[in-house]
Amino acid sequence: MQENKIIGLLPGSIRTVVNREAPDAGKLQEIRLRTGKPLILMYRGEELVPATADGRRHIVSKEEINELIEHVSSYSLYAFEQEMKQGFITIKGGHRVGMAGQAITEKGRMKNLRYITSVNIRMSHEILGCGDKVFPYVTQCMRPLHTLLVSPPGCGKTTLLRDMIRQISDGNPYTKAMTVGVVDERSEIAGCHHGIPQNNLGIRTDVMDACPKAEGMLLLIRSMRPQVLAVDEIGAAEDVQAVSYAMHCGCKMLATAHGESMEELKRRPAFSRMIEEKRFDRYVILRDKGEIEAVFDSDGRVV
């Protein structure tokens, strides 16, 4: 299992605790380490503050943080300078290792990190087939509709988007196979390692990894001529403009956004105009574990 590989990178003392407290690595979602603070796990959707064998909380040391960074970066953090500008490294298997500490800046922009004091390992999980439940609502005439997946953080919208991309790329009973362009700004959809997607996105999918969303959408339209474009977590004004441009170019759009409800989206300037102009055909509101709460059409009616 890919999850076991990331656990193998942990310092021995922490690995022992994780293996004992989270024996099913496939259900482990996050491992958080902060210098001088207790180790915290997100396991089966619940936060755990595990104890050592003698019953005390495991307090993360500076040495454990340094050892983990050395393992993750193959003893050359400098080689990951471009990724570190975004505050994380994506490792084989698509797992994302986020870091915080003292920033090294150049001309007012972050160049790298040093004195790393916090690490958040987010485990990459594919759930093949999780998109089955949504396709009856977001397709028409064997083609996907412009669709926006909306949920609070951590409710499965990226996981759902990933499987929708795979199924559209390969084709399924609701849509013919189509070419898909993915702009993966934070390397969370494809989980690229050295540019190679670690997650299954189908046989007709092209990925623009670690590229700003707005710029990446334009680049993919020009270079790869996708029939479908997919992006995660739109929200900035330039993202919205690029989405509108892609739609005008004939691309079907799949996107996600943070939000609790349609009412909340309407109150946000970046989305209110898109809703008024009926840009998206479907709005899928998700709740915990990717469950569908409601699906709305472009007029705001429940589908």
Image: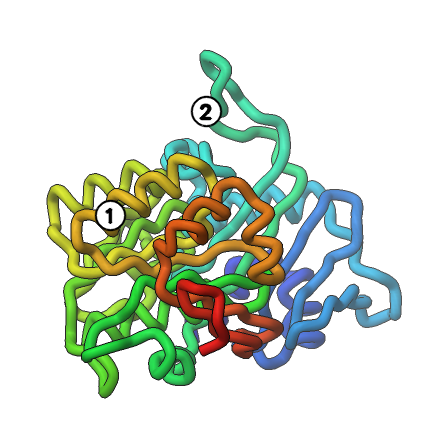
Q: Is residue 2 left or right of residue 33?
A: left
Residue lying furthest top: 107
Q: Is residue 197 above or below residue 218?
A: below
Closer to us: 169 or 192: 169
Label 1: few (<14), some or many (≥20) within 10 Å?
many
| Residue mark closest to the camera, 2 vs 1 | 1
Identify which residue is drawn at 68% across, 64% down: 41
- In the picture, measured across the screen, residue 216 lies left or right of residue 58, that is left
- The residue lying at 32 percent from left, 47 percent from top is 243
On screen, residue 238 versus residue 30, left or right, reads: left
Q: Secondary structure at mark 1?
A: helix
The residue that appears at 41% across and 54% down in the rendered structure is 232
User: What amino acid is found at the position of numbered circle 1 in the picture?
Assistant: Ala
Q: In the rendered image, which residue does mark 2 sit on? A: 111
In the rendered image, is residue 202 in sight?
yes
| Residue 192, position as x, y percentages in the image | 32, 54
Which residue has dot 1 on it? 246
Q: Is residue 25 left or right of residue 39?
A: left
Q: Residue at x 53, y 68 (%)?
A: 285
Image quarter of residue 280:
bottom left
Q: Position of residue 251 (x, y in %)?
A: 20, 56
Closer to us: 26 or 282:
282
SS category of the residue bearing label 2: strand
Q: How many marks?
A: 2
- Label 2 and label 1: CA atoms lie apart by 31 Å
In the figure, residue 264 lies in which quadrant?
bottom right
Along the viewing direction, whichever of 85 and 216 lies nearer the viewer: 216
Q: Position of residue 2 (x, y in %)?
A: 42, 70
Compare marks 2 and 1 and give the one earlier in the sequence. Answer: 2
